[in-house]
Image: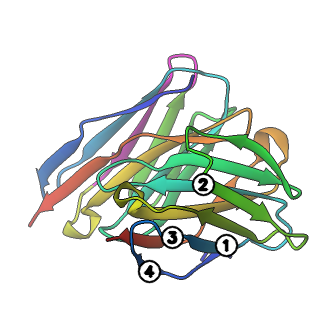
Amino acid sequence: ETGVTQSPTHLIKTRGQQVTLRCSSQSGHNTVSWYQQALGQGPQFIFQYYREEENGRGNFPPRFSGLQFPNYSSELNVNALELDDSALYLCASSLLTGEYTEAFFGQGTRLTVV
Amino acid sequence: KQEVTQIPAALSVPEGENLVLNCSFTDSAIYNLQWFRQDPGKGLTSLLLIQSSQREQTSGRLNASLDKSSGRSTLYIAASQPGDSATYLCAVMNRDDKIIFGKGTRLHILP
């Protein structure tokens, strides 16, 4: 158990719809990162939030957006869903301490777009 | 730009054998390197984390090494068991606190 929880665990959406995924960080962590893992691939970095501000973004279109709340929990929002958005979405929380930073991952949300 | 490569992409070995999984990365300016296990349809399970100042970490039958200067890491699994069958992912944390993953090695232990 990493103390990072994600909800829901699975969901099915229709192409064109919008989806919100949620992540509850480990206690004391001020940073959350989101990753997309397509079938047969390694996880790809989507973006990171540090103290409620975006702190870096990977190669994902603007329809992928996020929020981090004052309690450091986070949401990933995806608009205008496409079939290729079907993937496992992982969040990771961390406390930025320079070289001793360690990220802890949740168990993911499996999104299927039909 | 950091790139992480894992070789081989897939591996099948008989039960009881020792095996080595390889990981290479292009930028040595990292905070740490981590090995994960992933079972089909599941999330990530952290196996070992090696800080940039360390050379190796051990947990049970697993041993991970890090050679930062050459950009290489290995995960050694001793006395493999069918329960070790899974995908193994190598990931490096860059100094901008972002994690870059390899594509994984799919391991199948034959009973």
**Considering only order in the chain, which callout, 4 or 1, is on the residue closer to the N terminus?**
4
Of the residues shown, which amino acid type is indicated by label 4? His
Chain letter for mark 1, please.
A
Residue under label 3, please give it: A108
- Considering the image in quadrants, where does the N terminus of chain A appear? bottom right
Disc 4, SS? strand
Disc 2, SS? strand
Q: Are marks 4 and 3 in contact (CB under 8 Å)?
A: no
Residue appearing at x 79%, y 44% in the figure: A55
**Considering only order in the chain, which callout, 3 or 2, is on the residue closer to the N terminus?**
2
Where A106 falls versus B12 (above or below)? below
Chain letter for mark 4, please.
A
Q: Nearer the viewer, residue B44 or B47?
A: B44
Q: Which stretch appears magenta?
A: B68-78
Disc 3, SS? loop
Residue appearing at x 24%, y 58% in the figure: B80
Residue under label 2, please give it: A64
Residue under label 4, please give it: A10
